[in-house]
Image (spheres, rainbow, N blue to C red):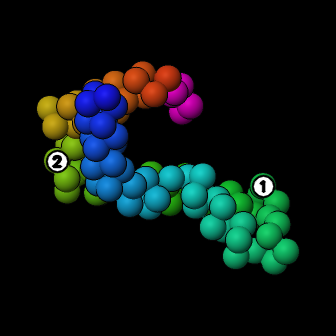
Amino acid sequence: SFGILLAAIFFLGLFSYAGPICADRSISVAMAILLTRAPQFTLTKQKLEELYSNDKILGKRYEEFREAGVVLIQNETLVLTKKGQKIAQFYMLLLKFLNLKENF
């Protein structure tokens, strides 16, 4: 039907935009790549956490979020902007639509 076709076009467009972002930002993707590069495809949890620490995960994004206008950083405190609120609402709706849980 026309609705299914329209939905397919929408999701294809969304993926072409968000797919590269997800590949760069996905913790799961990063873990898989680190395991691929490890000897015999194995790493201890401790070694994985050393290679992909919270500082690397969050630190990289603070400045990117600020530069993109998603947050303001004031006295070491992040403040979500109107733009950031709209982005968050979009993804919350997308999670609900896809019947996915917030696993964070």
Residue density around tag 1, few if under 14, some if 14–19, many if 20 or more, within 10 Å: few
- Per the rendered image, the range of residues in magenta is 100-104
Q: Earlier in the sequence, mark 2 or mark 1?
A: 1
- Judged left or right of residue 61, residue 99 is right
| Screen quadrant of the C terminus | top right
| Screen quadrant of the N terminus | top left
Q: Which mark is residue 45?
A: 1
Kind of residue at badge 1: Lys
Query: Residue 2: percent from the left, percent from the top?
Result: 26, 30
- Judged left or right of residue 58, residue 14 is left
Query: Residue 102: percent from the left, percent from the top?
Result: 51, 28
Query: Residue 13: percent from the left, percent from the top?
Result: 27, 49
**Total count of labels:** 2
Query: Residue 34: percent from the left, percent from the top?
Result: 66, 68
At 80% from the left edge and 64% from the top edge, which residue is drawn?
Answer: 43
At 57% from the left edge and 58% from the top edge, which residue is drawn?
Answer: 29
Corner quadrant of residue 24: bottom left
At 72% from the left edge and 66% from the top edge, which residue is drawn?
Answer: 35
Q: Which mark is residue 69?
A: 2
Corner quadrant of residue 82: top left
Instruction: Indicate whether residue 101 is drawn in magenta.
Output: yes
Kind of residue at badge 2: Gly
Instruction: Indicate whether residue 43 is drawn in magenta.
Output: no
Distance, label 2 to label 1, CA atoms, is 35 Å
Whether residue 61 is visible here, answered yes or no, is no
Nearer-the-camera pick, 69 or 22 = 22
Q: Main secondary structure of the magenta part?
A: loop
Whether residue 8 is visible here, answered yes or no, is yes
Nearer-the-camera pick, 35 or 82 = 35
Q: Which mark is residue 4?
A: none
Nearer-the-camera pick, 95 or 9 = 9
- 102 to 70, vertically: above or below: above
